[in-house]
Image (cartoon, rainbow, N blue to C red):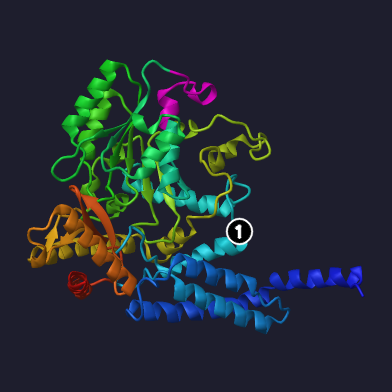
Amino acid sequence: MDQPASDRLESIHERIRLAYDPALLQTAGEKLAQELGRHLTRVQACEGRVLNWASPQDNIARAAHLADNAVESTDPTELVTRFEKLVHEMLSHGHNLHDPRYVGHQVPPPIPLAGLFDAVGSVTNQVMAVYEMGPWSTSVELAMVSKLAQYLGWTESDYAGFVTHGASIANLNALLVARNVALKGVWESGLGAPTKPPVLVVQSDTHYCIARSAGILGLGTSHVIKVGLDDRRRMDVTELDQTLTRLRSEGHPIIAVVACACSTPIGAFDPLDEIADVCQQHQVWLHVDAAHGGSVLLSEQHRHLAKGLERADSLVWDAHKMLFVPALCAFLFFRQKQHSYEAFHQDAPYLFDPTAPGLAEYDLGLRTVECTKRSAAYGLWGVWSLFGPQLFADLVDVTMELGRLFHEKLAASPDFEPLHEPQCNIVAFRHLPPELDGATLEEQGEFQRRIRRMVIESGEFYLVATRLNGTEALRVTLINPLTTGKHLDHLLDALRQAGRACLSL
């Protein structure tokens, strides 16, 4: 016999009430905190694997199996037990960035407490687009914009900044503004078919998201003009000047020059002051991708690396890199506030209240690609409010010192070859045992790829690969402040062991 409609409705409401039960949340939250504490204790002690490697097929099948076998219970105790199991599965199959042997991508082990502040925003869903929808999250974001702007030396009110979901969106947002400023009326009329196509002039090692932006903005990736590098893989300022002169003489509209602080392959900081001089001379927009390197401004010891960053028309600075908060939290700054409104020329009366025009400055959805946006600055604000800015300076100094230390260890090891002198905590290198004497560059490169794969699948360390000077290389980002010199010694030994195994095959 079918269940009466009233009983079905009551059953539905019971499930919903349980899903929203504050007591269930509290109990599960206590279990979560305990499990995370135990997990980080193990991980920071280097117990277990850095990367819990499994094939994509196996992981997908495991995740699908768990999703297909929900307990569908109304018993809170049973639900909490299931919750604990699911958390355990997440932690035991994930990537352990808090392990000091993690030396991989430019993704840090975030300060754990930052994740708890983020959780407040997630649980209560403090979304943003207009001030009245997220008054505290907007206020927190703009407070942190002000704090970081002070390190740029921007103490006046004529700048603007906000947070986006990552540097790729932030760079796109900035270059959209630069395009609209350079090509008046393009937002409404489109690019059309100009006699001389507009171009984007970039440092040769710029992140691939810059070329993506050119494609999205209708400029075309074939109109991204790369400027050569000097012997430290920094933008060659003389060549930049010559390039801009040539493009002007040929009649090409120049959207922007894109410089790096620092570049992804080896962490090179472009000479920003000199680049700014050239851009000023040619009256060209200067955008700086400082996603990784902007945080050196907090360090007395290293802020000189970003000298001139304050002269950029726009810049990107990721807090989810060298400010050690969870992804994603990328700051986009404009030196002149009015430029931040050039991204979009649109009306959205269902969002923006014309009866309160004074709030437009705080309705950040007017200026960002995103409409609904998570309260991404909670983690940074919370940790800053707990520890103050010195903690972030300390984290920069410690990890930058690790880059220098690792370079010294490589240089002192005859079977390793550092490929550059690091300016920061990114180091590229190769392992070249005597057995590879006389090997071709292709053979040496294949050896680097194979030993990296062996090391990361073993779970002993996690590092990445890159390509420099025509061959494959190994690359580390020493972004875990818990890593020590002993861990770096063990990394070299792990690579040697993998090399011996590879050569014996």
Q: Disc 1 marks which residue?
A: 125
Image-quadrant location for residue 79: bottom right
Q: Label 1 neighbourhood size at 10 Å, few (<14), some (14-19), many (20+)?
A: few
Is residue 183 part of the magenta span, yes or no?
Answer: yes
Location of the C terminus by quadrant is: bottom left
Q: Nearer the viewer, residue 415 or 343?
A: 415
Badge 1 element: loop
Residue 455, how many percent across, how many down? Answer: 28, 70
Question: Which residue is painted at 15% across and 61% down in the image?
Answer: 407
Residue, far front: 505
Question: Does 378 sit left or right of 324 as displayed?
Answer: right
Amino acid on which disc 1 is placed: Asn
Question: Which residue is painted at 67% across and 78% down in the image?
Answer: 71
Q: Which region of the structure is painted magenta? A: 178-193
Is residue 304 part of the magenta span, yes or no?
Answer: no
- Up-down relation of residue 369 to residue 405 (above or below): above
Residue 342, how many percent across, how many down? Answer: 48, 30
